[in-house]
Each structure stands twice: as C-alpha cells, then as structure tokens.
Image: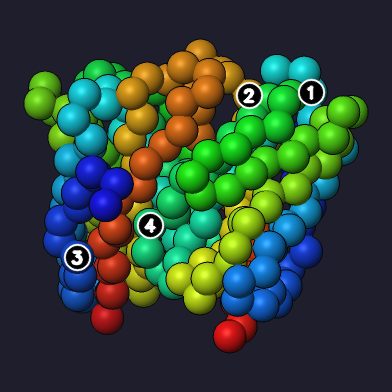
Amino acid sequence: DAKTTQPPSMDCAEGRAANLPCNHSTISGNEYVYWYRQIHSQGPQYIIHGLKNNETNEMASLIITEDRKSSTLILPHATLRDTAVYYCIVRAYKAAGNKLTFGGGTRVLVKP
Amino acid sequence: DSGVTQTPKHLITATGQRVTLRCSPRSGDLSVYWYQQSLDQGLQFLIQYYNGEERAKGNILERFSAQQFPDLHSELNLSSLELGDSALYFCASSPSTGDAYEQYFGPGTRLTVT
C-alpha cells in the first residue's frame, strides 16, 4: 500500500471548515483513499473513502486531485467533538487480506 | 456505536500470565481484524480472520494467537505476558475481504501488565 504524508497537527476554529491535507504521491490505480479518526483512545471511526471522484457523506467531504497524488478531507462545520487524530490511509484490494496501515495522522484541535 | 463489541474493557494482570480478549463483530460481518495500539508503536495490525479462517498476519508475536468461532466471534489470546504488551487492543469487522469495504472498530480492551 502507498505511503501517506500528513501534517502532524492543526488547529481549527469551531464552526469553521477544517481542511485536512494528505499526500499520497505513490498511489497506484487500484488503491483507495480512506479516512478514519480516533477520538482520545476510542476505537478508530470510519469517515469516508474514495477512488477517483470526490465523495461526500453526512460526516465529511473527500476531495481527490485529478492525478490522485493528494487528497483533502473537509469537515464543513467543525465542532469541539471533532477534536481527534485523523488518519489518511491508502489501501488496495488484496485477496490475501485488507489490513489498514495507520501512520501518525494529524492531530486536530477544534478551538471555541 | 459501531456495532462491534469487545470484552473486557479493562484488564490488569501480571507478567507471565495469559489473558483472552473477546470480540463480537457487527451482525453479518464475516471478517474480523485485531490491532494493537501502544504509545511507542501506534496502531498496528496483528491478524485477520475471515469466516473462521486466518486470512492475513501482521506483526503478531508468537506468544499471541487468535481464532474465529462458527458464530463469527473472535478471541485473541496473549500468553507469557510482558510489560511491553501493555496496550489498547482493538477489534474491527467488515462484511467481506472485498476491495472497498470499510472496517468498523470496537471500543477496545485496555491491557495493563504489571
């Protein structure tokens, strides 16, 4: 699976959009981009995933560049409960198993 | 609530002992994954089972073993425990091993070895 690079931390104001970047310049054509978050030692929570097209769900939007070398997770209206570590993960389908490889993630602090 | 349950929530035991962690996947999910999260190593994949069979192995120590039962619940057995085994252990499940299925994580078991 391709390696990802994320900033170690970022702050965001409550009520504003939070834009979390992720670089995955070695991504290959069959690899998906997944985002998970972990709120203070709770189990990681799935947010969204995509292959080529931009995706949106009730939690967030995922914007993937045309060359697929980077992506941005957008939390449209950050709340204090969005304070967490956010992980960007690139993963391909493998018949032999589909583990998630977590990096360091981005520690997001939402401030009032 | 992800629908994945793990017991116990907390476990305190001594070095050299053996413990069993239990995971019940979401209803209908066939795949179960185990992850370990320690302060210095981050979240690491240990092992995956699919419908009762081992599917993939990660950095799982030989002292650790797992199994998935016919009712699809899974157990992770940790033996000859060392101080360094203190960590959060998470179980996750997904419907299949298919390409785009997301994994849903349980709340974890916090193991403290003294």
Q: Which residue is mark 3?
A: B9
Indicate whether B84 appears above or below B37: below
Indicate whether B36 appears above or below B59: below
| Amino acid residing under circle 4 | Gly
Looking at the image, which is closer to me, B32 or A32?
A: A32
Q: Which residue is mark 1?
A: A28
Labels 2 and 4 within one chain: yes
Residue at 67%, 41% (x, y): give it.
A62
The reply to whether callout 1 and callout 3 are in contact (CB within 8 Å) is no
Tell me the SS state at disc 3: loop
Looking at the image, which is closer to me, B107 or B19?
A: B107
Residue at 50%, 34% (x, y): give it.
A99
Q: Which residue is mark 4?
A: A43
Looking at the image, which is closer to me, A79 or A88?
A: A79
Mark 1–mark 4 distance (CA, rounded to whole Å) = 28 Å
Q: Position of residue B106 (x, y in %)?
A: 29, 51
Mark 1–mark 2 distance (CA, rounded to whole Å) = 8 Å
Q: Which residue is mark 2?
A: A92
| Amino acid residing under circle 1 | Ser
Mark 3–mark 4 distance (CA, rounded to whole Å) = 12 Å
